Amino acid sequence: MKGIREQSRAVWEEQQLFFQSGRTREMDFRLQQLDALRNAIKKYEPQVLEALRQDLNKSEMEAYATEVGYLLEEIKFTRKHLRSWAKPQKVKTGKIHLGSKSLIYPEPYGVSLIIAPWNYPFQLALAPLIGAIAAGNCAVIKPSELTPHTSKLLAELVADTFAPEYVTVMEGEVDTSTALLEQPFDFIFFTGSVAVGRIVMEAAAKNLTPLTLELGGKSPAIISEDANLTLAAKRIAWGKFLNAGQTCVAPDYLLVHESVKTELVSEIRKTITSFYGEDPLRNLDYGRIVNQKHFERLTSFLQEGDVIVGGQTDPASLRIAPTVLDGVTWENAVMQEEIFGPILPVLSYRDLAEVVKMVNHHPKPLALYYFSENRSQQDTILEQISFGGGCINDTFLHLATPYLPFGGVGNSGMGSYHGKYSFDCFSHHKSILKQTTRFDVSFRYPNSKNGLKIF
Ligand code: NAD
């Protein structure tokens, strides 16, 4: 039996050979593979929903909307536009290059590596794959070991759908990732934590492999005094407690204008009851924490402030009720790391300048949500704070559209994807200047006397 390093090398070599054959670049081939992926997702849908229930207690509705249905829409969109995206794009040529044409040719990088996290374990492994296939690459997918049912199912689905020299899954823990990262892949797409993102980037640097990093961080939701508080509460609670708060773009904490804090909290309390019932831990469709370690990390935060909503926990089912935490400061551990669970600290502010300063004092967030009716204040936030992306008067939805690039900036990541941006993410854009041979401009050459020479 081969060791993990030899296995990784063999997979990489096999895929390199297949990529060199040129098959993956053919447009018909790419379209067929997208169709095959769509059909496989449909065929395996019941098992996928079951695996997500086992790994994270995702309800069918949530699992369909955020994982299965999302992927089917993304494939449909990509399929519809792919021929036009893949065409060489003609651009202007400067007057100085008289007689020539300029074109941009998208070409696949080659063999790509996709490393996925556990929170949307099906979607975040396959959404990048759509981009990889569309752009004409081969791909090795490394799912997260923390969601073993979904990881196993991904391996089965992919083996049933694609030739391994084209797309394959390598299941495993850190040693598998490490062995894969030693191979000179042509492109790496990593989704996960900031800490592991650094390790991946270091490994990529050894081979000068281009990469995209989709990371996390603390994403604020800022609620101004003029916001529609009932709507804000609903949209915040939805974005925060989806998947029990284990969402990279979930509002991590609230910054609310001090004059509306009490009312907002009361609206959030009402919303939680209307979404999950009086006792959310009895709600069979409310998600669970991925494992014991994360459960303990999260429950330790409950000691750090005053629990003003929720706070109930159930170690047996690894569940924590939607919780709002008051009385915390930036000194508390809950404010020093990404929470990634159903605990929502509330901080208050007096004026917007304070908010801008506070957020800018910390690493650039992956997402930011601002609730206000005031256009000029919205502009202040958008102009003065750097973050990956976000919404005005909503949460989460900026990532659910193929028309917007999704990604972070600074500590929250680099590069972006979704829709055409996924195609671009997995493509090198080759610049070509096609020169005329009908005439030549002699004065560009050293020591020339004549200007234009016509042949
Ligand atoms: P993680 O970084 O622990 O793991 C991600 C992947 O990296 C897994 O497949 C894991 O096996 C692998 N890995 C772990 N340690 C490694 C190492 N030392 N070397 C190489 N590979 C290693 O992240 P996670 O806990 O699975 O996911 C949670 C994090 O991901 C959060 O920070 C969240 O914000 C972020 N996230 C970001 C996005 C996004 O789109 N930006 C989406 C989902 C999650």
Image (tube, rainbow, N blue to C red):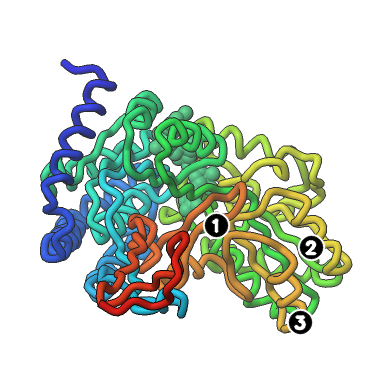
The residue identified by callout 2 is: 356
The residue lying at 24 percent from left, 44 percent from top is 154
Please tell me how crowded label 1 is: few (under 14), some (14-19), or many (20+) other residues with Cα within 10 Å.
many
Q: Nearer the viewer, mark 1 or mark 2?
A: 2
The residue identified by callout 3 is: 376
Q: Dot 2: what SS?
A: helix
Tell me: 331 left or right of 333. right
The residue identified by callout 1 is: 249
Tell me: 426 left or right of 404. left
Please tell me how crowded label 3 is: few (under 14), some (14-19), or many (20+) other residues with Cα within 10 Å.
few
Question: Disc 3 residue type?
Answer: Ser
Q: Say above or below: 65 vs 308.
A: below
x then y, percent, for residue 279:
55, 55
Is the shortest distance between ligand 1 and the CB of mark 1 under 8 Å? yes
Return the mark for residue 319.
none
Q: Say above or below: 224 vs 63.
A: below
Pointer 1 or 2: first along the chain: 1
x then y, percent, for residue 294:
54, 35
Question: Disc 2 residue type?
Answer: Val
Please tell me how crowded label 2 is: few (under 14), some (14-19), or many (20+) other residues with Cα within 10 Å.
some
Q: CA distance from mark 1 to mark 3?
A: 25 Å
Q: Nearer the viewer, mark 1 or mark 3?
A: 3
Would you say the residues marked 1 and 2 are in contact, meaning their CB atoms lie under 8 Å apart?
A: no
Q: Is residue 278 at all visible to an observer of this figure?
A: no
The residue lying at 22 percent from left, 47 percent from top is 138
